[in-house]
Amino acid sequence: MSNIQIIKKRKVAELKPHPKNESIYGDEDIQELAQSIKENGLSDALIITPDGRIISGHRRCKAVKLLGWETVNVIEIEFPNEAEELKALLLKNQVRRITIEQICREGIMWEAILSPKSLQRRRDKNGSQGTTRDKVAALIGLESGSTFYKGKRVVQAIDEAEKNGDIAKATRLREALNKKINSGDELREVLSYIDKADKFGYIDEAEALKKVYEENGIHAAFTSPVLTMLKKNIKSGKKQALPTQTNKENGKKQASQTQSDNNQKESDVKQSQTQHTQTQWVLAKLGQKICGSVWIASDNRSDIWDNEKLGGFSIDALPNLGIGNQSQKIVKYIDVVWLSGDNHVNAAFEVECTTSIYSGLLRLADLIALSPNLTFPVYIVLPKSRVNNVIKELSRACFKGLKLDKKCRWIFIEDLLKEWEAILKYGTVESIIEIAHSIDSFKVDNDD
C-alpha cells in the first residue's frame, strides 16, 4: 500500500459505498451529522479507492449528498487485495461509537479475513498462539473468543429472522444483544426452542416457556425448568408415555383417537388457510376500490381466491413511506396494507385465523414503538371465537405501555364477510371503523 496520501477533490456522484459497509453498520441516520457539517464544515477527507469505492467516510458522504454538495475532499489509496481493503474499512471505523451488534458484525468480517491463515488453529504449548476467535475478540475489544462466538450466533439469528420476515423476533434479539451479549445469546436459545416446540407439536411447553419469558424476563426463561424439560422432550422425541403391552385395546383406541385428532387438525388447518385467503382477498378488493393501492405480504401473493391471485391486487414494491427503515420493514410483512396515491398508508390489517394473535400484535407494537406518531389505524382481523384471546393479549402490560390497546382495533371475519359488498359499493375508509371493535367499545356493547 502506498504511504503517499494526496488530498484531491472528487465529485460526490462518482463515489460509491463499500459493499460490506452496510452489512456491518446498517443504514444509519445521518440527519444530525448533516446539520453539524452544514454548521462547521467537513475537516477530514474521505478515504476511497481510485475507482471511487469508499473505505472511510460513508456517513459523511451521505451527509454531504443530502446537503447538495457536488464535490468533496478525498484521499485515494490503492490496496493490493480485497483482504487489505477490508482491514482498512474495519480499522478506520475503530474510532466510531457503535453498537454491540455492529462490533460483532465487525468480528465476523475479521474472522473471514483471518480464517484462510489461521482457522481452527489451536494454542501451542506455550499458549502464545490463540485461536481465530481469540484474535478476533482482541481486535474488536471483547473479553474472549467465547464471548465473540455468542455474539456471532445472535447476529446470525437476527439475519435469519429478517430473512424469514419475522421482524418482531429480529428486533427483540437486537435489543437484547445491544444490552448485553449474554442476554442476546440466552434469548436466542429461548426463542429457538419456542420455535422448535411449535414445529414439533409441543404446544403446552411452548406456551409455558413464552409465559415465563414474558412475565419474568430472558434469564428466568433461559434458566427455567420448562426449558430444561423441553430440551429433553425434543431430544428424546417423547411427548407422552406410550401405551403399555398389557393394555393393547386401550392403546389401539388411543392410536385411533390420535389419528382422528390429526385428521381433524389437518382439516382445521386447511379451513383456516382458506378463510385467511378469502379474508385477504376481501380486504384487497376493498382497499383497491376505496384507497387506490394495496400491498399484500409477499408470502401470500401466490394464494388464489375466486380465481384471482392475491398478488394481482398488490403493488410490486412498497414505496418509501417516510417512517424509517425499520418501520418500513415491519410494514412490508403486514398481511394487507391500504395506501392512497401519495404513498400514504390509510390502514394496516393482520389476519389471524388460527395463528398466534400475540405474534401479530407484537409486529404492530414494534411498528408503533419505532414510529410512535403514526396516524393510520391498525387492525387485527379474526373469527368471533377468538375474541377472548385478543382481549387477553391487548390487556398485557407491555402492550398497554405502548397504548396498543387504544391504537389497535379488531374486526370479526364474520362481520367483514357480511358487510364487505355494501362497503365496496358505498363505503369509505371510515366504514371499516363502523364494524371494528376496541377493548372499551366492546365492553360497552356487551355490558349486561
Image (cartoon, rainbow, N blue to C red):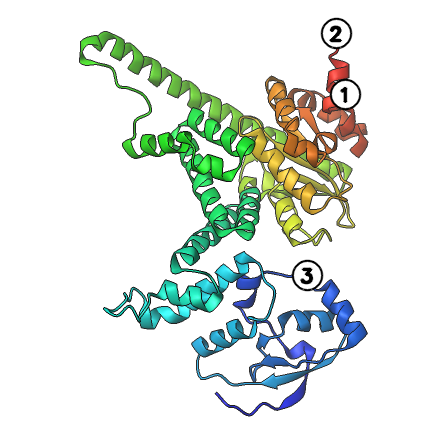
* Disc 3 target residue: 29
Q: Depth check: 181 or 281 in front? A: 181
> Of helix, strand and loop, which one carries label 3?
loop
Q: Residue furthest left?
A: 245
Q: Amino acid at mark 3?
A: Asp
Disc 2/disc 3 C-alpha distance (Å): 52 Å
* Disc 1 target residue: 441
- Residue 198: give x, y in percent of width and height: 43, 32
Disc 1/disc 3 C-alpha distance (Å): 40 Å
> Of helix, strand and loop, which one carries label 2?
loop
In which quarter of the view is residue 120 placed? bottom left
* Disc 2 target residue: 448
Please tell me which of labels 1 and 2 falls first in the chain: 1
In which quarter of the view is residue 245 placed? top left
- Residue 307: give x, y in percent of width and height: 57, 34
Q: Which mark is residue 384?
A: none
Compared across the picture, whether 359 is left or right of 289 comes to left
Q: Which residue is rendered at x = 70% and y = 64% of the image?
A: 30
